[in-house]
Amino acid sequence: MSASTRGDTGEVRRSPRLLAALLTVVLAAVAGCTGGTDAVDQTAGGEFRFVAGTPSGEVLEQADRKPAPAVSAALVGGDPWELSSLRGKVVVLNFWAPWCSPCRVEAPEFDQVARATKAQGVEFVGVAIRDNERAVSGFIKKYDISFANVFDRPGKVVQRFRDLRVAGLPFTVIIDKQGRVAAVYVTAQIREDIEPVVTRLAAEG
């Protein structure tokens, strides 16, 4: 159960912490994080067709998963990085930007999950887009983000996933141990959403 708790009577209830986080996300989204000149425009159709994204807490059946595209990029600081180097692990690619308000809610939540699940073979990688590297580095330092981040100002990594047809930030692509896209979440996620998903994928044969 990813985004709610269930009482003894079977009634689904949301925790105050979760409601506050979700309210922050909604208000930030209304403020225009997915619009304006910094919006991510990915309207080309293609292989994946996840137009509406995967519902929170759900993953595609293994038979329905398609291979993730090959990705090569530079990490913040300049070191080279390739997605293929993480084959055999569950990879959480989180696309974000320092100016994106929901990303500020999501980032510390994701870092908690990254620290808790790394020993299970889960790797989080941020993909920071449409900003300068100084702002990106400041964001990472401010929120004490422990996982690696790609600096993708020109949007080349985003374009590798253009067939997902995502139209805003943040969004998250989860890749299984076989290198296949297992889920695409097009809204901000919190720990209760994402941790059960990556734990389940890490346990797959």
Image (cartoon, rainbow, N blue to C red):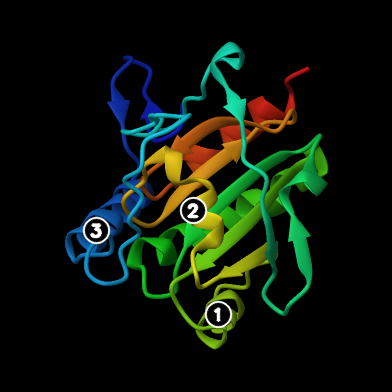
Nearest the eye: 13 or 137: 137
Can residue 145 be seen here? The reply is: yes
Q: Quadrant of residue 50?
A: top left
Going from the N terminus, do you reach mark 1 or mark 3 first?
3
Residue 114 rendering spot, x and y as whole percentages: 67, 51
Nearest the eye: 194 or 164: 164
Q: Residues within 10 Å of mark 1 (few under 14, many from 20)?
A: few
Going from the N terminus, do you reach mark 1 or mark 2 first?
1
Q: Nearer the viewer, mark 3 or mark 2?
A: 2
Q: Which residue is mark 2?
A: 159
Residue 3 rendering spot, x and y as whole percentages: 40, 35
Hey, what amino acid is under mark 1? Lys
Q: Residues within 10 Å of mark 3 (few under 14, many from 20)?
A: many
Q: Residue at x 65, y 25 (%)?
A: 200
Disc number placed over residue 142 in the picture, else none? 1
Locate the C terminus by quadrant. Answer: top right
